[in-house]
Image (cartoon, rainbow, N blue to C red):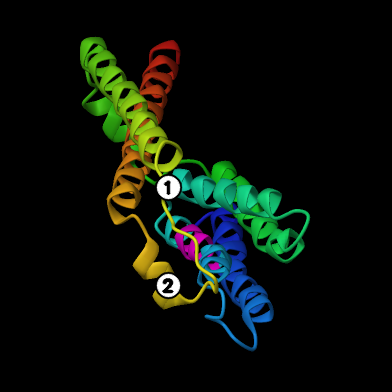
Amino acid sequence: MVPATRETSRLLAALALPVSLLASAALLFPAPLSDAFFAGVVLLNPLFAAVGIAGAWTDRTVVVWVAALLSVGLSVVGMLSVGLLFAPTALLLLGSALAAQAAGPRAGVRERIVADPPSGRERLLRTLAGAASILVGVGLVTGGAFERELFGSCARETLACALETTNWGAVGVTLLGFAAVAVGGWVVWKQVYVSRVLRRARSG
C-alpha cells in the first residue's frame, strides 16, 4: 500500500505540470518563437515540473527536491518580471518534495543497506569521488559559462539567429559541468544516507 504522503507527493507533482504549461502558454502567446532565448527560459518551467513528476512517481525523493529547488531558483531569478507566473509550479513542487520526504525511502532500501553494508573505506572513497566530481563540474561550468560567451548577439532574437550564434563548444562544456555536479552531489548524498542508516541500525 502506498503511504498517503507518497500519494500527496504524486498528486502535487502531477498538478505542477498543467500549471506550468498554462503559465508558459500565457507568456509565449501569440508568437512563441519570436524571442528564442525567452522561450527557452519559459519552457524550463514545465521541464522542471516533468522532472518532478518522474521523481515523485518513481519514489525518488532526491529528484523531486532537485526539480523543486530548480523551479524555486527560476522563480527567484524572474521575480521582477515573470517569476510570479512560475511561483505556483515552484510551490507545488516544494509541497511534493516535502510530502515525499515525509513518506520516507522506497520500500526495502534500508533493509538492503543493512543486509549488505559497504565498509567505511568504501563509503569514504565514494564520498571523495563524489566531491571530486562536484569540483570538476564547478570548474567546467566556470570555464564554459563564465569565461566564454555562450550566445552571440542578435538584432532580433529569432530561433535561427540563436542557433547560428550559439557557442556550442562552450554550451557542451557547461552542460557536462552541470552533469558532473549533479552526479557528484548524488554520490555524496547517497553515502551520507547509507552512513545514517547504518548508524541507526547499530544504535537500535
At a point 61% along the width and 70% down the height, the residue shown is: 20
Q: Which mark is residue 116?
A: none
Relative to the observer, which residue lies in front, 17 or 132?
132
| Left or right position of 156 against 150 | right
Question: What amino acid is labelled 2 in the image?
Answer: Cys
Q: Position of residue 115 (x, y in %)?
A: 24, 27
Please tell me in which quadrant of the rendered image residue 39 appears: bottom right
Residue 119 position (above or below residue 165): above
Judge left or right: residue 197 versus residue 96: left
Q: Earlier in the sequence, mark 1 or mark 2?
A: 1
Looking at the rendering, in which quadrant would you find the C terminus?
Answer: top left
Q: Which residues are magenta?
A: 46-53
Q: Indicate the secondary structure of the residue bearing disc 2.
A: helix
Secondary structure of the magenta portion, mostly?
helix
Q: Which residue is rendered at x = 34% and y = 22% of the image?
A: 131
Q: Mark number for residue 161?
A: 2
Across and down, in percent, residue 183 comes to 32, 38
Which residue does the image show at 43% across and 52% down from the upper left?
59
Would you call the spot at circle 2 few (<14 residues within 10 Å), some (14-19), or many (20 or more)? Answer: some
Residue underneath mark 1: 149
Locate residue 140, reporting x and y percent.
Answer: 33, 35
The correct choice, above or below, for 142 with respect to 61 in the image is above
Q: Horizontal and vertical percent for residue 47?
A: 48, 65
Would you say residue 190 sits in the magenta stretch? no
Tell me, yes or no, whether the two marked residues, 1 and 2, touch with CB atoms within 8 Å.
no
